[in-house]
Image (cartoon, grey):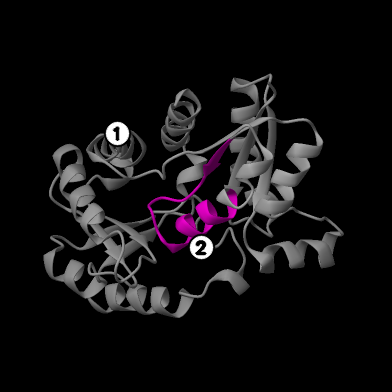
Amino acid sequence: MKQGILVVTQGSIHPVARRNVIDDFVGSISDRFEDAFVLCAFTSPEVRTFLRQRDGEKMRDIRASLLHMQMEGVTDVTVISTHVYENEGYLSMREQVSSCANIFKSIRVARPLLQDETDLDLFARAAHSAFAEDKKDSALVFFLSGEKTRGNDIFESLENKMRTYLGQDVFVSTLRGRMRMHTVLKNINGSKAVLVPLSFLNKGQIGKMEEEDLDAYQASLASMNEAELDVDELCMGLGEYDEFQRLYLRHLMEAMRD
């Protein structure tokens, strides 16, 4: 038996983000599982193309990574993705992994970061550790793209859970889901707000050609400024905080034990 671990992420064109977030996360996994064959797959074709044209670097997608693992003698694979919730991208990732299941003795996929009540409580505790100092007298607004039909219930539950640890001025805002910024603005008390990306990488760490929701995000930011809020945008994605990396690793270890 030879164990393999595949880390699946959207990827980044920015060297600093690669080093400080993606490589650091992959390195943490390699350090913890020294005997495992660890690879990283980039799901974004735009990022892979950009890196190939700019740097001559050929990053593998999910299928190519799994085939490479097979060539290296890996028999049992566990896949951990950086998805925050079970969105369209996570489901697509699972389908791609399943298409290669017959070439391994076993293949497991770890759950996304937020899926059940335990995840929500652990995330809220991690958020208190990471952001309590930033919050102080400001509202804390976690934002992400979201989807119209997925994730809304879990984000509402997350918002309530985080208020247990961080106070009432904590919100989750989605660009596409039910929890829009105009609703958040009606409920913010005070004149200051801190925006926190609810994603492994923040919007600036991927690459502008990947920011399909950039206009919607800028419109949300403009609406906050129009409401005369003093807004502080945190530049770090969740993947840069040890508190949240540990939550991803917890799911990886759970999947490996199944």
Residue type marked 1: Leu
Horizontal relation, residue 125 to residue 19: left or right: left
Tell me which residue sits at (72%, 31%) in the image: 74
Quarter holding the N terminus is: top right
| Coordinates of residue 97 in the picture (x, y in percent) | 58, 49
Nearer-N-terminus badge (1/2)? 1
Tell me which residue sits at (51%, 60%) in the image: 92
Tell me which residue sits at (68%, 33%) in the image: 38
Q: Nearer the viewer, mark 1 or mark 2?
A: 1
174 or 112, which is in the foreground? 112
Q: Is residue 228 visible?
A: no
Q: Residue furthest front?
A: 102
Residue 95 is one of the magenta-drawn residues: yes
| Coordinates of residue 183 in the picture (x, y in percent) | 17, 71
Disc 2 marks which residue? Answer: 203
227 or 43, which is in the foreground? 43
Mark 2, Cα crowd under 10 Å, few <14 / some 14-19 / many 20+, is many
Mark 1, Cα crowd under 10 Å, few <14 / some 14-19 / many 20+, is some
Residue 56 is one of the magenta-drawn residues: no
Disc 1 marks which residue? Answer: 122
Callout 2: SS: loop
Callout 1: SS: helix
Q: Is residue 206 visible?
A: yes
Using the numbered discs, state the Cα–Cα distance from disc 1 to disc 2 in whole angstroms.
Answer: 24 Å
Residue type marked 2: Lys
Magenta span:
78-97
| Coordinates of residue 25 in the picture (x, y in percent) | 58, 37
Horizontal relation, residue 97 to residue 88: left or right: right
27 or 151, which is in the foreground? 151
| Coordinates of residue 112 in the picture (x, y in percent) | 41, 45
Tell me which residue sits at (30%, 59%) in the image: 151
